[in-house]
């Protein structure tokens, strides 16, 4: 892979052989972000589990104390009072059969989070093959299938993110923007890692957090010492 001059210069700031303390890594991530836009800071965590086994799945959601810095567009599948509550909470899109038809027939995907009232899941289930691969399928584990749709909308707007393993046992999560500064990013980072550690499956053996890398959208990856992540491996 070829990189541009700015990336190459930024990469020179990072010692590839070093495992950084979390605070040092986040400060360096900000320093190495040279794009003209406000870059997103992401954490990539490799876990010592095998996601092919049901008892080693790691998935959940957490509200970051400082949000993500991104405006979140919320779609809610609801009727009646639930639909009214979702609209009052600020959901951009609210519907039932009409919304399902729009997604199926027109390929409408102009939203970042999908929430559903429990009585709508029989209907929403038809969208599994469309929403599932995009990580948008409402789920009780993620708190996006709930009788309190207004609360779910408020949490999504406040910076709730979902963490889940990909096929290589790595999770990729945004924790804010470089403009947040190191302190706010550290608060979000600690909140995410705390949630991931608490979600450790009983069947997981050995070292749980195998590696942790933080990077901005256009910047180099910076490796964090997994033994220093909330002292989880200390």
Image (spheres, rainbow, N blue to C red):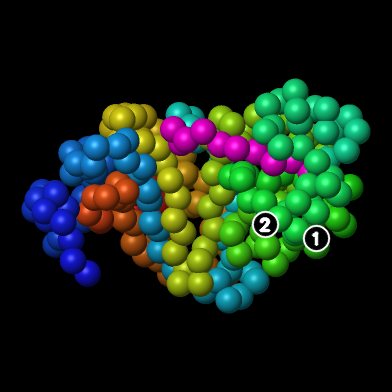
Q: Secondary structure at mark 2?
A: loop
Q: Which residue is mark 2?
A: 107
Q: Residue at x 52, y 63 (%)?
A: 165
Q: Position of residue 158 (x, y in %)?
A: 56, 30
Which residue is nearer to you in this view: 233 or 172?
Answer: 172
Q: Which residues are magenta?
A: 68-77
Q: Main secondary structure of the magenta part?
A: loop
Mark nearer the N terminus (1 vs 2):
2
Considering only vertical position in the picture, is 100 above or below 82?
Answer: below
Q: Classify mark 1: residues with Cα within 10 Å, few (<14), some (14-19) or many (20+).
A: some
Location of residue 147 with respect to 231 vertically, above or below: above
Task: Name the spot of residue 183 as percent of width and height, x first.
Answer: 31, 29
In this rendering, does residue 12 appear at all? yes
Comparing labels 1 and 2, the label whose residue is closer to the camera: 2
Image spot of residue 134 (x, y percent): 59, 59
The residue wearing badge 1 is 125
């Amino acid at each position: 892979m070829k990189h541009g001059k700015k990336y190459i210069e930024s990469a020179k700031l990072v010692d590839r052989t070093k495992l950084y303390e979390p605070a040092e890594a986040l400060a360096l991530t900000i320093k190495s972000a040279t794009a003209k836009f406000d870059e997103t800071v992401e954490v990539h965590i490799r876990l010592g589990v095998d996601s092919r086994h049901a008892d080693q799945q790691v998935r959940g959601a957490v509200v970051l104390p400082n949000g993500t810095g991104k405006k979140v567009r919320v779609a809610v599948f609801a009727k009646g009072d639930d639909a009214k509550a979702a609209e009052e909470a600020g959901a951009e899109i609210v519907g039932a059969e009409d919304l399902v038809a729009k997604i199926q027939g027109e390929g409408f995907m102009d939203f970042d989070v999908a929430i559903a009232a429990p009585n709508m899941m029989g209907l929403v289930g038809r969208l599994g093959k469309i929403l599932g691969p995009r990580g948008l399928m409402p789920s009780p584990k993620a708190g996006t299938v709930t009788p309190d749709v207004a609360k779910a909308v408020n949490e999504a707007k406040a910076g709730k993110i979902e963490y889940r393993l990909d096929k290589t046992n790595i999770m990729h999560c945004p924790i804010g923007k470089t403009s947040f500064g190191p302190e706010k990013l550290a608060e979000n980072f600690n909140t995410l890692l705390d949630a991931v550690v608490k979600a450790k499956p009983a069947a997981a053996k050995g070292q749980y957090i195998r590696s942790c890398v933080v990077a901005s959208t256009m910047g180099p990856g910076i490796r964090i010492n997994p033994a220093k992540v909330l002292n989880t491996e200390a």
